[in-house]
Image (cartoon, helix red, strand yellow):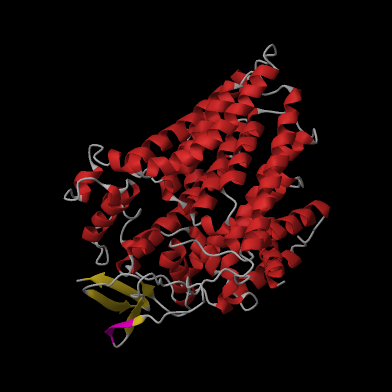
Amino acid sequence: MDIIIFSLLTNFIYFCCGILVISDKKSDFHSQFNIYFIGVIIISFISLLLNFFTPLTTLINSTVYLLIIILCVIKKKFNLNKKHLNFLLISSFLTYSLIIFSTVNRPDAGLYHLPYVSIINEYKIIFGLSNIHFRFGHISILQYLSAINNNYLFLDNGISIPLASIVSFFYLYFFYDTWKIIKKKESINLSNFFSLFILIYIAFKISRYSEFGNEAVAHLSFFYLIHCLLKDDLKKINLNKILLISVFTFINKPTLGLIFIAPIFIFFFQNGFNLKKKIFYLFSFPSFFLFLWIIKNIIVSGCALYPLEVTCSKSLSWANIKQTAHVNSEIQAWSKAWPDRNDQNITMEEFNKDFNWLNAWTKKHLKHILNIIIPYTIFLFLIILYIKIKFKNIFIENINNYKTKLILCFVISGAGTFFWFIFSPLYRFGSSYLITLISLFFILAIKNKALIKQNILIFKFIFIVCFVVIVTKQVVRIFIDSKNSPWPNIYTLDPNGKIYPKTKIKIDNNFFYYLANRENQLCMYKAGMLCTNYPVENLKYSLKKTYTILTIN
């Protein structure tokens, strides 16, 4: 029962925060989503900003949430009409159904997601934190959003809610975009078909909390941006909104950085070379959020974008350039199936070059990718085939209205797919590029038949199928996993709930950390524990004006 209550209260806080800054008077589901999405981003920003000066303790977090509610009362923003209430209740139930009896993402949650959250709850920002654990150099903004949800009411369980909440908001967004066509509230356009195709992918692939990791929110945000580009007139589209979505996507998953092609193109499309406009967007909230995130990266790792060595500063004492270069090579190599290489004597650097990795990658990762892409592609192909046959003599010329939009979306997803394949072809690093590119090709195939009113039958069929698939998956999972704890176990991966002790490593009288050195046992979440899974050699601790600095001698 506490899961549904805490989910409801968390989503209500997002609503309160969003409604404080949203002036849009619309109340349809898309507008509702925008309120919650903005609320999530604002609270993420607050938690990041606060951690520069203080740990996100239960007192701090409770105070922030209480202040948000008080501001809503003072500004008389509590106008919960029927549509507001429906979105809150449905999203909270979805959040609950995703969380209950679920497990955390393995192994990443135990390796660095949860340990980083516990560090945020216990310490203000630490200089050189990546020297303890290199993965702390490339965490997601989700860890900050999770950390601030640990308060006097929710306690530790609160950190499990935000991920499920955001995914539930996206569920509602894409379901509603399909539903409004069924209810004939809006004529069909290409953006609706994109929503339909993404809904199919969500039902097929994004339906288990334990598989979300940091990637689910990033990829769903990417899909959301592409939908916005296809839906709105590029000359009138809100550039600040597009920039904000791009920043949020990027700070969740930097491999999706080519998403910034969208706001850059739209800026010049709308403003040309207007210097005043450039300055305006340079000092906008999304730009400041991105700037703050880069500063955080530099403090934690010595690099603006870890582990890209070119973005690192050798003049910073905590910057470990040698480790950064190794981590960069290691991430590339593992994403290219390094353990499955034929030549066991080849170095990582050589393996990453000249497609020496292609044979190993083909044997392992390509098979995994094809197991996902082929069924998805076949499903879309059958939809397009049906439309082509059913309406073979009907043509509606509408492509000119979408030509620029489609080209922009093709450029983003096409360039993203290319660079993903060249540098880090692990599916979860760039799946939204690939899925978007495939979807756009099929949309292009029906460009002259998309607006036919009879296509509503397709929308009805897919809506029902996706709804049934998602509900069935959750019901079956809940039934199978009902022996688990209702809340995801954030303390251990042991099936019996045993928490293994960590080894205390003392640096000097003022600083120590913990090492999870037992096989298959990870750091997980432990309040007050600075933990790593890897031994650290030559670590040096210093304190400057209350800030901890960790360097490697």
In the image, farthest residue toward the front: 480
Q: Quadrant of residue 225?
A: top right
In the rendered image, the vertical position of residue 172 relative to residue 421, given as above or below? below
Residue at left 70%, top 23%? 451
Question: In this rendering, would 310 be left or right of 150?
Answer: left
- For the magenta stretch, what is the residue range? 504-508
Q: Nearer the viewer, residue 508 or 101?
A: 101
In the image, farthest residue toward the bottom: 509
Q: Is residue 506 magenta?
A: yes
Q: Quadrant where the N terminus lies?
A: bottom right
**Residue 275: x, y in percent?**
46, 37
Total labels: the figure holds: 0
In the rendered image, the vertical position of residue 366 relative to residue 214, given as above or below? above
Q: Quadrant of residue 75?
A: bottom right
Q: Is residue 495 magenta?
A: no
Question: In this rendering, would 74 be left or right of 151?
Answer: right
Residue at left 27%, top 42%? 357
In the image, farthest residue toward the right: 82
